[in-house]
Amino acid sequence: MAGLTTHVLDLTLGTPAEGLVLRLYRWTENRELIKEVSTNADGRTSAPLLSEDELSLGTYELEFDVLEYHNAAGITGGFLTLVPIRFTVTDLSRHYHVPLLLSAFGYSTYRGS
């Protein structure tokens, strides 16, 4: 199963990050907005960000609106506003999963499966 998905875990609250707005961009000559969605109660999007048929070779960026999420969750005094993760799709037969582990003062990501 190829395509693109994400998952956001809130390490400050110890829960999935529900209601976090994220935007997916494709980079060509300019940054092109493809999709804007919010995470569900499991910290995931309700559908893949890109299906196997929609995924193409190239550079993408996921932009997570963490300031709005933290404000809505009642987490004040945070440091981050937006978390951009830029990555390259090099193999259309593989699935790309880009998780975000988030706290009010830092984050981590990795190539998931």
Image (cartoon, rainbow, N blue to C red):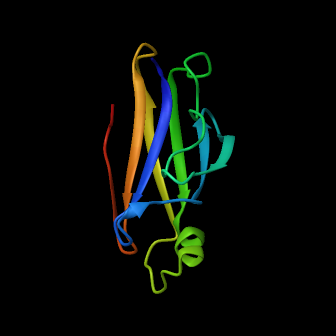
Q: Is residue 53 above or below residue 36?
A: above
The residue under the point 68% across, 41% down is: 35
Left or right: 94 as drawn, with respect to 75: left
Q: Quadrant of the N terminus?
A: top left
Residue projecting furthest to the front: 41
The percent position of residue 88, horizontal first and vertical second, equals 43, 31
The percent position of residue 93, horizontal first and vertical second, equals 42, 13
Residue 16 picture quarter: bottom left
The percent position of residue 90, horizontal first and vertical second, equals 41, 21
The residue under the point 41% across, 17% down is: 91
The residue under the point 36% across, 74% down is: 105
Residue 34 picture quarter: top right
Task: Give the camera-side residue of 92 and 58.
Answer: 92
Residue projecting furthest to the bottom: 77
The percent position of residue 50, horizontal first and vertical second, equals 58, 29
Q: Quadrant of the C terminus?
A: top left
Left or right: 108 as drawn, with respect to 50: left
Q: Is residue 89 above or below residue 46?
A: above
Q: Is residue 90 above or below residue 37?
A: above
Number of marks in picture:
0
